[in-house]
Structures are given as structure tokens and as C-alpha cells.
Image (cartoon, rainbow, N blue to C red):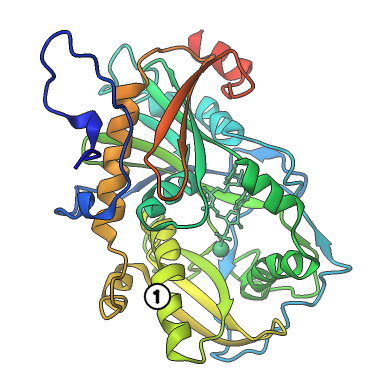
């Protein structure tokens, strides 16, 4: 077994260099007890407005309004004339999250932070990046690139778009582009701006707008601080505190055959589970739509019940494999990324069927910690 978590190899005898610094993604290596994953705690939130401007508050929070069980929402409505699309060519990297960190620095420097650490966190990243790590042992199509910089003891992880992803983005079909709009349109049909108002399906869909939660948690011995976009919250005054009151909204093709149901369990529920489990979002509301983009059914899926839902699938994904792989990947990153320097990037790279590898880049195109962040954190 040449590729068994090489970085964790037993202490090598003196003079034997650590040569095979790759990380295997083979599933069976990660089939062990579920690691400790602390209940995520929300430590703050922020908003991005219709022009993608940052606000250190929850002004973009929306409230879930339960639709009929079969509401016949037309998700195509407004695509041509009431749609403002975020410019995906603009790479924001960790900037919004770093802005939030600076605005809330005082809250973050608890007594337990070591004096060498500016923040009480081993890792700072987007939730979406961790979702990709969690699903890696089961991913067969899309690789990833994750840039990591160690700065004042904390490891910052920021995604780099792969060449394949860029080509895919630049060559999307008109049909695919329209289908990407459907998810946002579903949000508009089911979310209101305040507790007492109703959704406004006649308004403009603007994908620059976002409400993001910032949570802190721990995976085994890794202290994590990450942010994720949240679609809406339960407006019941008796609803639990964030993140437990948050609701993730999804659309997916309606399920008509056993084969479609099996694919939904094997592929889509893996992504949905990983994304919502990480920040502790307990409920996912799924809108099932037909080929014309009409929602024909709505169902609530409890994140904690997904692992039971999939148990009858042959050769299905396992949450423990996802979490143990993530844990070992973070250990691998801690082990590899030694130089504490805001302009050095360790670029971790993965392609399906391969091990994770890395390369080191000094003052390169990959550097992602902005000058304003480094200056402010150093001062
Ligand atoms: O620079 C990058 N490569 C990324 C930046 C990748 C992913 C996210 N982001 C940033 C953006 O600033 C965005 O506001 O993170 C924010 C969202 O972060 P996340 O919650 O960690 O991302 P993820 O879990 O992948 O996606 C959550 C939602 C998506 O909803 P669905 O239901 O489709 O999963 O965020 C949206 C999308 O609505 N979204 C994005 N928004 C802005 N930029 C992006 C993106 N790149 N990807 C997904
Ligand atoms: Ca969503």
C-alpha cells in the first residue's frame, strides 16, 4: 500500500528526508470512527448589497415563507428582463471575510489565543472550500486548487479557479446559464425581506446580494473559522438561535424513476449534506422542478437525517469518510505549510484518481492576503 497517508508516516529515522508528501484520497483509508466535530457557533455575520459592497451587519437577511406543497412556481420568469448577475470573472478570494475579521478583531482575540497567533483559529476559509474538501473522496469529475498562506500562526485557505473550471464557466450553454438562474428565482418565491412581509416574485433577482454567517468550530484538533452564505432563516419567534434557525434552499430535477432517486441520493445529497452540515444548518428546503423550470413539489430535508436516507443505496458515500478526509487534509496542510509569510502560497492541487500534491510560490499571482489586511493585522 504505497499511498497510505504518507505524511503521517511513523517518525522517520534520522537523515531520512520526508519525501512522499502527498495525501491519498482513497475512501477506505478514511473509514474509521466519526471525528469530533463541535457544534458550530455563530460569531457574527455580514451582508453584501446589490453592488457587492460589504456591510458588517445582517441587512441582507431574509425570512422563509413556506409555500404550498406543489406551488407551480415558474422559475424561468424574469430571466430575460429582471436579472442582475454577479460578475463571476471578478475573483474576490477571502476579501469579504477578511474585512469582517478586521471589523470584529476585538471579539476574536480571546484569552486562549496564543501570543504568536493573531486569531484564535488554525484555519480561516469559506465554507464552500471546505465542502469541496469533504466531498473529495467521492468526486470523480472536478479537481480543485486551494491556495494556503500561513500568517501569524493562522492558515488561510482560498480557492484558485482551475483551468477546466474556467473553460467550463466561459463555455456554458444558454440553457445551463438559465438553469443557474432557477435556484435564485426559487429563493425569491420563498423569501421575504422582513418577518411581516411576503415574497415579491415581481422584483429583480440580483445575485450580488448575500447574507453570510461566520462560524467557529473544531474538527478534531483543528480550530476552524469560516463563513458561508445563508439563504434565509425561520421567522418563527420561537425558532432556535443561529445557525439552527437557518434554512438552505435548493432546486433539483423532479424524481420520476428509481434510477433518478438513486442518483439524487448518491450525488446530490452528498453535496447538500456537506454544505449544510459544516455550518450547522439543520434544514434544507428542496424545490423539485420539471424540465420547463416549474416547481412541482417542495420538501424539507433534515440535514441530520440525510445519512439515514442514503443507507439503502449500494456503495454509497459515508459522512465519516468525508469528515476524516477533511481532518487528515487539514493535518497535512498544517504539516506542509511551515513558513509564516503573507506573500508565500502553498498551492494544494487535486485531480480525480490522483493524490493531493502541492507546490510553493513566493510573491506570485497566487498571493491572496491583501496588503490592507496584512498591515492592519501586523499593527
Ligand atoms: O472565490 C471563490 N472561488 C469563491 C468565493 C467560491 C465560493 C464562494 N465565494 C464567496 C463569495 O463571496 C460568496 O458570497 O463565498 C460566498 C459564498 O460562500 P460559500 O457559502 O462558502 O459558498 P458555497 O457553499 O459554495 O455556496 C453557497 C451559495 C450558493 O448557493 P447554492 O445553493 O447554489 O449552493 O453561495 C452562492 C450560491 O448561491 N455562491 C457564490 N456566490 C458568490 N461567489 C459563489 C461564488 N463563487 N459560489 C456559490
Ligand atoms: Ca441555496
Which quarter of the rendered picture does the N terminus lie within?
top left
Question: Which residue is labeled 1 in the image?
Answer: 265
* Residue at horizontal 72 percent and vertical 46 percent from the top: 88
Is the residue at mark 1 in contact range of ligand 1, meaning its CB lies under 8 Å from it? no
Q: Position of residue 241 (x, y in %)?
A: 38, 57
**Secondary element at tag 1:** helix
Q: Residue at x 31, y 70 (%)?
A: 316
The answer to which of 294 and 164 lies nearer the viewer is: 164
Establish if 91 lies above or below 237.
above
- The location of residue 283, given as percent across then percent down, is 41, 69
| Occupied quadrant, residue 273 | bottom left
Report the residue that reaches farthest toward the right.
Answer: 81
Q: Quadrant of residue 205?
A: bottom right
Q: Is residue 240 left or right of residue 18?
A: right
- Identify the residue at horizontal 58%, vertical 74% (top origin): 251
Q: Position of residue 83 (x, y in %)?
A: 81, 63
Q: Nearer the viewer, residue 128 or 213?
A: 128
**Of 183 and 360, the residue lying toward us:** 360
- Category of crowding for the residue at label 1, using alpha-carbon neighbours closer than 10 angstroms: few (below 14), some (14–19), many (at least 20): many
Quarter assignment of residue 74: bottom right
* Residue positioned 37% across, 21% down in the render: 337
Marks counted in the figure total 1
In the image, 153 versus 199, the foreground residue is 153
Note whether 322 is above or below 191 in the view shown.
above
**Can residue 39 be seen?**
no
| 360 versus 181 height, above or below | above
Q: Would you say 220 lies left or right of 152 here? A: left
Q: Is residue 40 visible?
A: yes
Residue 350, given in percent of the width and then of the height, sits at 45, 41
Say above or below: 234 vs 330. below
Amino acid at each position: 500500500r504505497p499511498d497510505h497517508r504518507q505524511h503521517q508516516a511513523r517518525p522517520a529515522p534520522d537523515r531520512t528526508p520526508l519525501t512522499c508528501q502527498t495525501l491519498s484520497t482513497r475512501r477506505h483509508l478514511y473509514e474509521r470512527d466519526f471525528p469530533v466535530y463541535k457544534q458550530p457557533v455563530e460569531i457574527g455575520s455580514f451582508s453584501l448589497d446589490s453592488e457587492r459592497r460589504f456591510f458588517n451587519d445582517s441587512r441582507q437577511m431574509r425570512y422563509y415563507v413556506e409555500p404550498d406543497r406543489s406551488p407551480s412556481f415558474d422559475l424561468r420568469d424574469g430571466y430575460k428582463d429582471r436579472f442582475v448577475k454577479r460578475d463571476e470573472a471578478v475573483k474576490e478570494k477571502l476579501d469579504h471575510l477578511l474585512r469582517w475579521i478586521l471589523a470584529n478583531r476585538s471579539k476574536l482575540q480571546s484569552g486562549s489565543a496564543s501570543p504568536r497567533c493573531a486569531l484564535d483559529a488554525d484555519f480561516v476559509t469559506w465554507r464552500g472550500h471546505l465542502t469541496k474538501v469533504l466531498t473529495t473522496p467521492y468526486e470523480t469529475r472536478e479537481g480543485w486548487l486551494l491556495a494556503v498562506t500561513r500568517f501569524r500562526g493562522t492558515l488561510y485557505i482560498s480557492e484558485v479557479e482551475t483551468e477546466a473550471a474556467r473553460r467550463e464557466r466561459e463555455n456554458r450553454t444558454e440553457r445551463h446559464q438559465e438553469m443557474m438562474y432557477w435556484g435564485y428565482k426559487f429563493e425569491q418565491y420563498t423569501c421575504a425581506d422582513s418577518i411581516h412581509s411576503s415574497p415579491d416574485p415581481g422584483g429583480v433577482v440580483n445575485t450580488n446580494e448575500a447574507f453570510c454567517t461566520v462560524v467557529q468550530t473544531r474538527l478534531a484538533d483543528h480550530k476552524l473559522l469560516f463563513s458561508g452564505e445563508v439563504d434565509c432563516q425561520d421567522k418563527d419567534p420561537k425558532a432556535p438561535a443561529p445557525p439552527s434557525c437557518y434554512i438552505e434552499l435548493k432546486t433539483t430535477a423532479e424524481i420520476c424513476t428509481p434510477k433518478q432517486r438513486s442518483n439524487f441520493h448518491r450525488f446530490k445529497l452528498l453535496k447538500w449534506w456537506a454544505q449544510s452540515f459544516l455550518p450547522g444548518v439543520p434544514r434544507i428546503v428542496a424545490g423539485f422542478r420539471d424540465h420547463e423550470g416549474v416547481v412541482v413539489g417542495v420538501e424539507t430535508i433534515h440535514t441530520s437525517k440525510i445519512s439515514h436516507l442514503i443507507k439503502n443505496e449500494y456503495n454509497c458515500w459515508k459522512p465519516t469518510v468525508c469528515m476524516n478526509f477533511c481532518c487528515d487534509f487539514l493535518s497535512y496542510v498544517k504539516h506542509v505549510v511551515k513558513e509564516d509569510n503573507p506573500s508565500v502560497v502553498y498551492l494544494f492541487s487535486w485531480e480525480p484518481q490522483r493524490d493531493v500534491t502541492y507546490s510553493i510560490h513566493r510573491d506570485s499571482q497566487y498571493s491572496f492576503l491583501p496588503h490592507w489586511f496584512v498591515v492592519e493585522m501586523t499593527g
